[in-house]
Amino acid sequence: MRRDIALGRSFVQAFTQADRSLFTALAGGRPLLDPVLPRLSHAADHGLLWWGVAGALGATKGRRRPAAARALIGLGVASVLANGPAKLVFRRDRPPTHGIPPLRRLSRDLTTFSFPSGHAASAAAFATGVALDAPGAAVPVAALAAAVAFSRVYVGVHYPGDVAAGILLGIGAGLLTTKVMPRRPWVPARASPASAWAPALPEGEGLTVVVNARSGPGNHSDLLAVLRADLPRAEVVEVGPADDMAAALTTAASTSRVLGIAGGDGSINAAAQVALARGMPLAVFPAGTLNHFAADLGLVGAGDSVQAVREGSAVAVDLGRADGISAVFDRFSRIFVNTASLGGYPDMVAVRERFERRIGKWPAMMIALCWVLRNEPPFDVEIDTERRQVWLIFVGNGVYRPDGFAPTYRNRLDESLLDLRIVDASAPLARLRLVGAVLTGRLGRSRVYEQRTVERVLISSRAPGPLPFACDGEVTEGVERIVITPSGARLIVYRPRRPGDGDGAAPGPGARRPLARTFSRRGAEAG
């Protein structure tokens, strides 16, 4: 035992001596970088540099926006750990500054402890967060992070060992963000192949694309340029705010072999109903704000859709179906490609999407959940003959990942199952227990939250007035009673060939298929 202690002390002494020698060599070197590194080090104070980088990433498209949100979360975790408990545990003094050139020193001496470097931890955490969601953008960000980390030695406020420890801590904090903000897979959702039912249109002849000018940013000039250049014989119909989308889709389908839609999930829902009714394939050109359905298909942009149409490559995907009695006691039937929801969930989605593009999905989800729990009263329903008092009901077309209130993606689009999620309001202290379960990662064990995979769900209002109801984000006038099942038919959708699509022919449009086995998962202990 004494020998082990002695060896440990010898190692610490050797490391400390080498660390100080390396510091002297780096911090007292030639002043080649004096005009740059001191200013860069100062810019990273309080994370201001990284907030600026996050703003630049958030102003772009694609995965850089969630990457910026993840990076800021990692930065916050790393900063708290490095500047709080870690420094208090190790209590290492700052390096002496007498050997540092005067022009290189900071304007004031630091009085906090040295180990680990908070600047290095924050920089590494930010770069790791970006790398997890946007590897292409991570290269320049990592270079900037490395320069910030080195600058802390260069200006004489940290030993190299402090910086190395900070980098390791920051990488760990960045990886930790996947526990609260799961990553969407790079591989698109699996679906049944259906190319036999989708004609190849090398120049777009027989394709009519309806463009919803109200979707997304509202400016689709780039999309229109791609369509006219790569599918010159396709017909393009732009639908403005004063035009009737349903009529435009019906007219387009009546004169085409393939119906195309450029818009968000609500537009895709409307087009899917027309395409399914006519037994024709659908070409989706993502042009909305979030494009959930296109993301599950693996369609990053219009180029992917163009490639699939020219190749005649398509898959068959499930649809959800909702049949019931509306708020005015009329019978109605609707399909949905992504989700259906009742109660406070439509409002929660609206609040979440208001903040999602700026701060990321998971932080926005927490804001939306708190807003709903504070402002929305629970409602009385009957779910499959069981009387319940609930806040939210979510029904997904297929099994969504991850668990919880921010379902983001599906691994498969051909499971013939529904993902049912319920927030119960009858338990004591339900609001407090629910928020606590979300923050501590114990939502799956909370009795306030229930998640099941089913083949059918019947929901009826047991209180005066209809239940708020939404399909694919489009809010309706509400329902009195509704039955939700997987649709008896699949939709044929173009997408480029993917390794996970499998082999063999898929059932054609309108073909029925057997339902899969039901299983369930619900909380086993109090949250």
Image: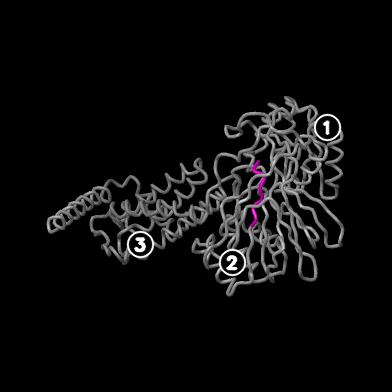
Foreground label between 3 and 1:
1
Lower sequence index among marks 2 and 1: 1
Rendered image quadrant of residue 507: top right
Query: Mark 3 or mark 1: which comes first in sequence?
Result: 3
User: Alpha-carbon neighbours of circle 1 within 10 Å: few (<14), some, or many (≥20)?
Assistant: some
| Residue 35, image x, y percentages | 38, 49
- Residue 305 in picture, x, y percent from top left: 68, 34
Q: Residues within 10 Å of mark 2 (few under 14, many from 20)?
A: many
Horizontal side, residue 355 vs residue 3: left or right: right
Q: At 79% from the left edge and 44% from the top edge, which residue is drawn? A: 273
Does the stretch in magenta take in 416? yes
Q: Which residue is mark 1?
A: 256
Between 24 and 236, the one nearer to me in the picture: 236
Q: Is residue 482 magenta?
A: no
Whole-percent x and y of residue 183? 53, 48
Query: What is the residue that sits farthest to the bottom in this orientation?
Result: 428
Q: Residue type at mark 3: give it.
A: Ser
Residue 488, above or below 227: below
The magenta-colored residue range is 414-420
The CA distance from mark 2 to mark 3 is 54 Å
- Label 1 is placed on what type of residue? Ser
Badge number at residue 107? 3
Quadrant of the drawing holding the N terminus: bottom left
Choose mark 2 or mark 1, whichever is in front.
Answer: 2
**Residue 448 - label:** 2
- The crowding category of the residue bearing disc 3, from other C-alpha atoms within 10 Å (few below 14, some 14 to 19, many at least 20), is few
